[in-house]
Image (spheres, rainbow, N blue to C red):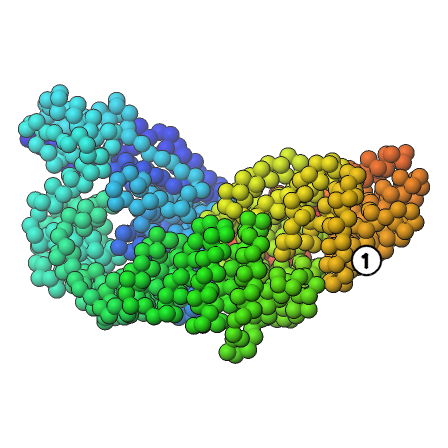
Amino acid sequence: MRGSGPGGERHALLGRRSERDTVDRLIDGIRSRHGGALVVRGEPGIGKTALIEHALAAPGLKVLRAVGAEFESELVFAALHQLCWPVLRWQECLPVPQREALDAAFGRTGDGTPNRFHVGLAVLNLLSEAAAEQPVLCVVDDAHWLDQASAQALAFVARRLQAEPVALIFAERDASERHEPAGLPELACLPEVRLSGLADDEARRLLASQIHVPLDAAVHDRILAEARGNPLALLELPHGADLAGGFALPAASPASGKVAASYWARLAELPAEARTLLLIAAAEPTGCPILLGAAAERLGIPAEAVTLAEESGLLAIGGRARFRHPLVRSTVYRSAGLDDRRAVHRALAEVVADTEPDRKAWHSAQAACKPDEDIAAALERSAERARARGGVAAAAAFLEKAANLTPDLARRGVRAVAAARAKRDSGDAEAALSLLSMAEAGPLGDLQRATVATLRARMAFDRNRDDAAVEKLLGAARLMAPLDTCTARETFLEAFAAAVFGGRFTPVDRMRETAETVSALSPTPLGPRPLDVLLDGLTAQVRHGYAAAVPELRRAVDIYRGGAGRDACDVGQLWAACGPAMDLWDDAAWRELAARQLELVRGAGMLAELPVALSYRALAHVHAGEFADAAALVDEAHAIAAEVGTPAMLHVDVTVAAWRGDEERTTQLADIATHDAAARGEGRLLSATEYARTVLLNGLGRYDAALATCLTAGDLDEISFYSWVPVEFIEAATHAGRSDLAEPVMRRLSERTAASGSEWALGTELRSRALLTEGSAAEKLYREAIERLMGSEGAPHVARARLLYGEWLRREGRRTEARVELQTAYEQLSALGAAAFAARAARELAATGARARKRVGEVPTRLTAQEFRIARLVATGATSKEVGTQLFLSPRTIDAHLRNIFRKLGVTSRRQLRDLPLTT
């Protein structure tokens, strides 16, 4: 006897009250215009699909669905197109850049790489427009098989649905078995429901619903024990087993393995033609019935095989062929022999339309049993198209397969190197290293071997920003130098940047070694590029000292400031040029280059580079005393870094906190940053952390602690840091009574500032020298320092110079004059939000017998960093659509934030925002 037929689906949510409630709250939320996302995770058969069906049963929703497929996981934007095609009629409502990005992503135009930000924002606004009619529920089943481009776009959308009547539910399989894919990192930070096995009493009830005949108690208990609460196992296994025959399962097999075994048992009962039909459907996940029929006809499959496949309950064919459960597809495909799989892929390659060359090439590659240059070349062309559409992971997969199918060993090596580069770009370092090993096994030329060395060095730096990585980059650059001077100089610039990251952990000789090698390089064939001028300036700084390098560094900064570096490929050069601008005390050039870099990165949609660009712009805001703007950019940098999986910009975050006088946050961030810096060998991060701690301690008036904190950093001559650290060191040392320590730092500072000659540089030198000077000479230095600094963009440095001057006047017994300077310093520092320095000014005022007067007209309610950013943009006259485009949010979300902003600030219109002293 056998158990009853399928029909237990109505019991699939048994014991899932909490999970149902979570889904119901999400659905109720979109009805009240509060969107969100949810990831449902669990092993195969645990009830993910049933929970999704519960959500889909909710009335009054527009439903969009997509299913990730193992065989489409390398086809760029495949799943996103599945999800969006029913609502593409709203595409005309989108701004032109978003429309064009969506067309490029879906292959409807050949206009180059789609902007990743614009694609994500286009999908967000597309769903927002569709939801204007009725709430939208988007369901993505088998999300673990999503192609990377679709996963990134959908995760981007999922994080921005708070004010949209849109919900996104992902069903993702746990990697609990061998060969199961790992969970998508893009979905890791979304709310989740993790399904586990049913409790024993619920499992017994579910099993009882499927068995309507007497069952031996031992068999009954064994099924329960080995199913381990997996609902699909409990529903499916009784239909494929002879329960009266003493049913027994291998104790070591996981539940999902038993479910697959159940499906395999059904497959085994089918004729070969029906199994082949199912295999065609498994190998071509578009579900197109026309394609399925054409391939079946090509293989001589009779029409009755379709009927048998559908009667088995494993496949349903309507407008699209769908398997009963996602696990059926993998069971069907993996249970087939290699020859059968190849035959099916060959048939599909023959019937796929010529208008889909990528799918045709992919099927041809799966069908190939030996190297084939024609297929490899087709895959290489597919990789170029995938990369043009922003599908780095797809390009990498095509190139990897192309390399494997290339018969000529030399050409195979070239393709393996290209595949390795693409794998590295897509984040798959292990595959990249394997491909490089493949390339090295063949007859590579010198240029290719140098390219392999460069890739290995870059991946070493990706993993560890330490001196070993610097050494590898230098070795690669030397190999490249006699072969390709341009690429060699680019690699040397990377080595310089890596050495700067290493900071104190990089041996002094390493920088000099790099500089000497660069200076011996032949000139580039077409004359010096902006990059070459910048590299020569850095080389001169290391070889001959800062003063000697100033002309070349200034020339490089002026070239970039004058317009060089306006292409996406120049982004790395722009941030490298920001460093010399800071060392030159040229704050106008620094701000301009940082702003252009950020604009370029935003415009190009370069998500991975955005946190770095935001950090340089944020530091320029710190210098100008625009701490709220800096905090907003830091907040954005953290969010983007989390999206792309890059390290957080802790050095900027801790600097902002220190200038604001937030001791608790500064200490917390500094502790984390110090640990990370030591672990990764990043001396730059350590110096930035010591600088931030010193700023805080100087503000708090704890000068001995401040001096102890910056002793190491003050003794270093680090690129991009000398305009920051010495001034804090000298202030701490003189207040701590250690002028002997301040004097040598002062001499080095004077040499630097004299060579620069900017108002910021000269004002900094005068202010620091005044601290080491007695009598009327000190007063003259303070006054001139304030005047000079007022000609710079460093508002907090002006205020701090007034504070120091006021403190000096008080010590000289000139109380009335001291009160004027200290009150001005207090007001300026308070207005900037430099709380610790403002409190120091207030204490000094109290020592003169006066009381600090608070500012008037301050907005009493603090905005969040994002609200502040939106308010500032709206105050400039920007529309919600324009603000949304810049911040990667939908206009509806911007409007929702504005309602909160108006409520907090007590205003009723956008116009009123222009007159408010906005603060976070």
Q: Residue at the location (54% across, 44% down)?
A: 677
Q: Against 343, is 656 above or below?
A: above
Residue topped by disc 1: 788
Q: Amino acid at mark 1?
A: Arg
**Residue 264 appears in the picture as rendered:** yes
Q: Residue at the location (40% across, 53% down)?
A: 427
Residue 584, image quadrant: bottom right
Q: Position of residue 396 (x, y in %)?
A: 34, 60
CA neighbours of label 1 inside 10 A, class few (<14), some (14 to 19), many (20+): many
**Residue 129 appears in the picture as rendered:** no
Q: Is residue 431 left or right of residue 343?
A: right
Q: Residue at the location (30% across, 41% down)?
A: 175
Q: Position of residue 463 (x, y in %)?
A: 44, 50
Q: Seen from this angle, which residue lies furthest top?
A: 217
Q: Position of residue 22 (x, y in %)?
A: 40, 34
Q: Is residue 133 left or right of residue 697?
A: left
The quadrant of the picture occupied by the C terminus is top right
